[in-house]
Amino acid sequence: MRHITGSIQRILALAAVAMLGMLLGACIYESVVLVPNFAADIPASLEHFRAFMKASNPGAFFRALAPSTQVTLLAAFLLSWRRGSARWWYLMALVLVVAVDVVTFKFHYPRNAFLFTAPLTQRPEELARTVQEWRWGNLVRMALLSGALISALRALWLVALQRTAELSRAPEGDQLASVSKAPNS
């Protein structure tokens, strides 16, 4: 049973790192590609951006991936409870990802509504100021996600070290069952 729990823990650790990498990559993409396009010639650029995002928008991606990442980190945290300091790194990653959602809901959603759904009757200066706020808020999200990714990578490293230590203590037969070895030439 412990071997199964350890395997699940390693899978969750890898999944958490991959998911955090996707979240961070998507935030970077927003800052590098999307923001310059909707900030280029306000209000015309916002009209074009709204037309382009008619069928779907980045929120669809984040609304699916963010909660999945939180559940994965929570599961990794719970499964690593007895396995040492890795659990605290998972907890740190989870807290940071939840903080990203707080920033998103409290800071970005009102600005998203103002920029992307409200009628474009505001002064261009007001719209440009809101775009700048959105841009700075996204940098905060990227910093939080970077911290979460680093925390999850640290947890993954600790899980790998624990597994290596377990294999080095196991009798030769147990190692062969867990790790394939190349035949001697």
Image: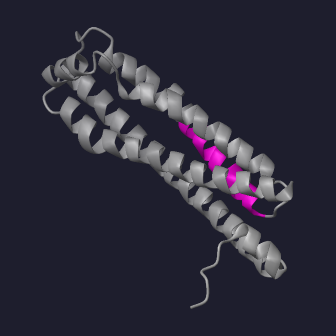
Image coordinates of residue 75 in percent, x first then y, are 73, 43
Quadrant into which the N terminus falls: bottom right
Magenta span dominant secondary structure: helix
110 lies left or right of 89: left
Asked where in the image residue 124 lies, by quadrant, the reply is top left
Task: Give the answer, above or below, for where 91 lies relative to 83.
Answer: above
Residue shown at 71%/75% (left/top)?
Answer: 164
From this viewpoint, which residue is outermost toward the bottom? Answer: 185
148 lies left or right of 51: right
Task: Give the answer, above or below, for where 2 lies relative to 111.
Answer: below
Q: How many marks?
A: 0
Q: Check if residue 95 falls in the magenta segment.
A: yes
Residue shown at 54%/35% (left/top)?
Answer: 66
**In the foreground, 67 or 139:** 67
Residue shown at 44%/30% (left/top)?
Answer: 61
Q: Which portion, as a residue range, is magenta?
A: 85-100
Is residue 162 visible in the rendered image? The answer is no
**In the foreground, 106 or 59:** 59
Coloring basis for residues: one colour
**In the foreground, 2 or 179:** 179
Image coordinates of residue 169 in percent, x first then y, are 83, 80
Quadrant into which the C terminus falls: bottom right
Asked where in the image residue 46 lies, by quadrant, the reply is top left
Residue shown at 85%/57% (left/top)?
Answer: 2
Q: Check if residue 106 falls in the magenta segment.
A: no
Image coordinates of residue 14 in percent, x first then y, are 59, 54
Task: Give the answer, above or below, for where 184 lies relative to 161.
Answer: below
Is residue 70 visible in the rendered image? The answer is yes
